Amino acid sequence: MTRKQLIEQIKLKRSYLCVGLDTDLTKIPKHLQSHPDAVFEFNKQIIDATQDLCVAYKINTAFYEAMGLKGWETMEKTVNYIPKDQFIIADAKRGDIGNTSSQYAKAFFETINFDAITVAPYMGEDSVKPFLEFENKWAIVLGLTSNAGSKDFEQLKLIREDTNQGGEFLYETVLKKVSSWGNTSNLMFVIGATKASDLEEIRKIIPDHFLLVPGVGFQGGSLEEVSKYGMNKDCGLLVNASRAIIYAGEKEDFANEARIIAQQYQSEMAGYLK
């Protein structure tokens, strides 16, 4: 999907909601447990119930990889079922030396037709560049994440060699350097919603890039603050909600319960869009 197409969908649906299909077999409604492909049936009903309210779906590949071959088959079926006007993200957090990253990119951009993949930048430019070489595909690089462990590395202050004093945070260096490897049409960044207070400064570094923002919902991030400090002229946000939507209900009407929550997000987002 191109940047232009993504922006058109945001304007059309008055939404920048991304629904996370982090589907855990042990958490789906009991009446589905006996289904031959319970996870796919669950995903299918969630997609049917929410597709007009969101612009993206994010599949956390770990939940599918844990099921072995069947999980990979379920993931591919899910991707193929999602409507083509949706931006489809593989939350796989890949990143390795160049030739390995190239194979990861082929796996998620060609073998399974995702639009984007999350990428860890720790190994540097040659581990990220292969994901940027595919037309109309995106790398979504980890910037400032919402987990508690982000303080271990991402929020460390770097020492400036010229003054031997504290300089910028490591994540700020990552944003500046990585943004020069691609462009605003093939590169996004992950910025956790629980770091909303930092978004204003982050936007000074990367004013035009799209941001994938997890952490709204169960993790306590504020959609209002994310929208206030993170939105740019093209919206520039994909706000992800996973558990708050897909596990909203536990009974046979679970998809309708999911739709109700997604509708609440969409309605609030419509009010923030300019």
Image (cartoon, rainbow, N blue to C red):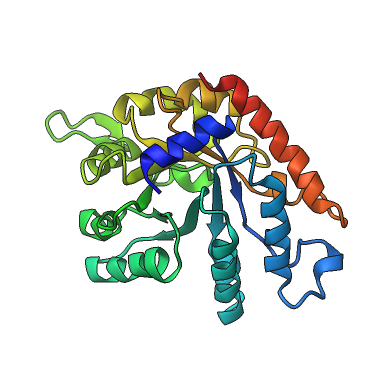
Q: Is residue 48 above or below residue 8?
A: below
**Could you tell whether 24 is left or right of 111 in the image?**
right
* 213 or 164, nearer to the observer: 213
Q: Is residue 211 above or below residue 107?
A: above
Quarter-of-image position of residue 124: bottom left
Q: Residue at x 64, y 47 (%)?
A: 51
Indicate the position of residue 157 as horizontal and vertical percent values. Answer: 32, 35
Quarter-of-image position of residue 266: top right
* 31 or 194, nearer to the observer: 31
Q: How many marks?
A: 0
Q: Residue lying furthest bottom in this view?
A: 69
Whether residue 129 can be seen here: yes
Q: Residue lying furthest left in this view?
A: 162
Indicate the position of residue 251 as horizontal and vertical percent values. Answer: 88, 56
**Could you tell whether 155 is left or right of 147 in the image?**
left
Q: Residue at x 32, y 31 (%)?
A: 206
Whether residue 15 can be seen here: no
Indicate the position of residue 54 as horizontal and vertical percent values. Answer: 60, 41
Q: Residue at x 35, y 35 (%)?
A: 209
Indicate the position of residue 22 as horizontal and vertical percent values. Answer: 62, 57
* 270 or 121, nearer to the observer: 270
Q: Residue at x 18, y 32 (%)?
A: 164
